[in-house]
Image (cartoon, coloured by chain):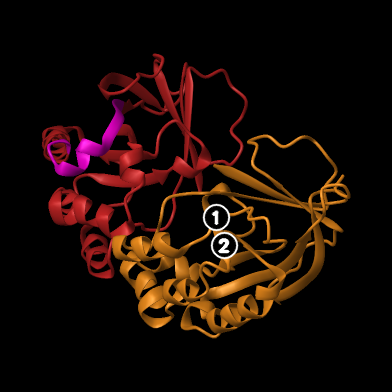
Chain colours: A red, B orange
Amino acid sequence: MLVTFQGRDDGEWAIESVTLLAGQNLPTAPRLAVIEKAVPDPKPVSWQLRGTVSNLRYTTRRERSALQAVQAPLTRREATSAALIPIRKSNEWWQLAQDERREIMEEQSRHIAIGMEYLPAIARRLHHCRDLGEPFDFLTWFEFAPEHTGQFNDMLLRLRQSPEWRYVDREIDIRVSRIAADRAG
Amino acid sequence: MLVTFQGRDDGEWAIESVTLLAGQNLPTAPRLAVIEKAVPDPKPVSWQLRGTVSNLRYTTRRERSALQAVQAPLTRREATSAALIPIRKSNEWWQLAQDERREIMEEQSRHIAIGMEYLPAIARRLHHCRDLGEPFDFLTWFEFAPEHTGQFNDMLLRLRQSPEWRYVDREIDIRVSRIAADRAG
């Protein structure tokens, strides 16, 4: 499934903040639209990022079972806060073999284990885009209730201090809030 | 790197045979063009398949080192025979976790180990296309000298009898031979 994220003048999410953590920033835009159609309607956009919901790349069966037991779906009524975090990793990362990347990501950095501690509060969907020729490698989309913002920030802080993040060479943290239906347009 | 394979009326490879092993066939074409430009020149084609040369998905550091010690590059002068084998795997395969796919592919099927037995005679490049929305998941391109055709067929026979191949639901084996430069057009 291809998902397109567009920074533009309309859309169901208001962009509250954009924090550049590494590399180059994106142009500014007031709103974010999340589009699950293969071909979005032609609208003027400030920026557009695309990614596919793909197969698991590192997660084991045991980890997946543990995740599935606690994770929450997207579009929960109370989850009116969200974040889009586009990330690119260095060539050095992509030249590593599969077991080397897994070792850094989980055995050293506990990426999956840390994420699991914040379930079900923080719902998450990962989109892959490296093979699409996009400017980022991953787009991760998170949804949560506003009262869980502190927990979400805590999770990101831990991940960004991990050995895996030494390979992140572009990262932008885009926080958004859902616009009430009668104000969207 | 995005690579486009086109079945058409011209191109540097003559299509010698097309063998349908599973699923639906492709339209017929006399020639194959292999294009490494991002945007191919607009030419009439019978079919077109695209894939990206991407990072390793299963190969460990140890296996990669062993492969790199013996593998041959593409475009060797003597390698005038080649094969394009597009493959699609079932949804059942893609729903498996990373360790489950690795277990079937290598521990049960010895996919990497079998391929290594045929190096350096058979040069190989894998292209990923599942995330591009293409009709296949992988396009594998092989190059070899005509006298190694028997070895190549032997390798394919062993792989196709492996547990991994129970998950292959579309496969076409396209054999081609390089057209001498003064006959290409």
Residue range corresponding to the magenta coloring: A160-176
Mark 1 surroundings within 10 Å by alpha-carbon count, few (fewer than 14), some (14 through 19), many (20 or more)? few
Quadrant of the rendering where the N terminus of chain B is positioned:
top right
Neighbours of disc 2 within 10 Å: few (<14), some (14-19), many (20+): many
Find the distance from the CA under tag 2 to the CA under tag 1.
6 Å
Residue A173 colored in magenta in the image: yes
Residues under numbered marks 2 and 1 in contact, where contact means CB atoms less than 8 Å apart: yes
Residue A172 location, quadrant: top left
Element assignment for label 2? strand
Q: Label 1: chain?
A: B
Looking at the picture, tell me which residue is in the foreground, B96 or B127: B127
Count of picture labels: 2
Chain ID at mark 2? B
Q: Which residue is mark 1?
A: B73
Q: Is residue B114 magenta?
A: no
Q: Residue at x 73, y 69 (%)?
A: B24
- Dividing the picture into quadrants, the one containing residue A141 is top left
Q: Looking at the picture, do discs 2 and 1 lie on one chain?
A: yes
Residue at the (73%, 74%) spot, across then down: B20
Taking the spot 40% from the left edge, 77% from the top edge, the residue there is: B104
- Quarter of the picture containing the C terminus of chain B is top right
Residue A94 seen by the camera: yes
Amino acid type at image mark 2: Ala
Q: Using residue B25 as the reference point, say whether residue A39 is left or right of it.
A: left
Determine whether A9 is above or below A175 in the image: above
- The residue singled out by tag 2 in the image is B123
Viewer-nearest residue: A12 or B65: B65
Q: Nearer the viewer, residue A148 or B55?
A: B55
Q: Is residue A96 left or right of residue B112?
A: left
State left or right for residue B77 relative to residue A88: right
Nearer-N-terminus badge (2/1): 1
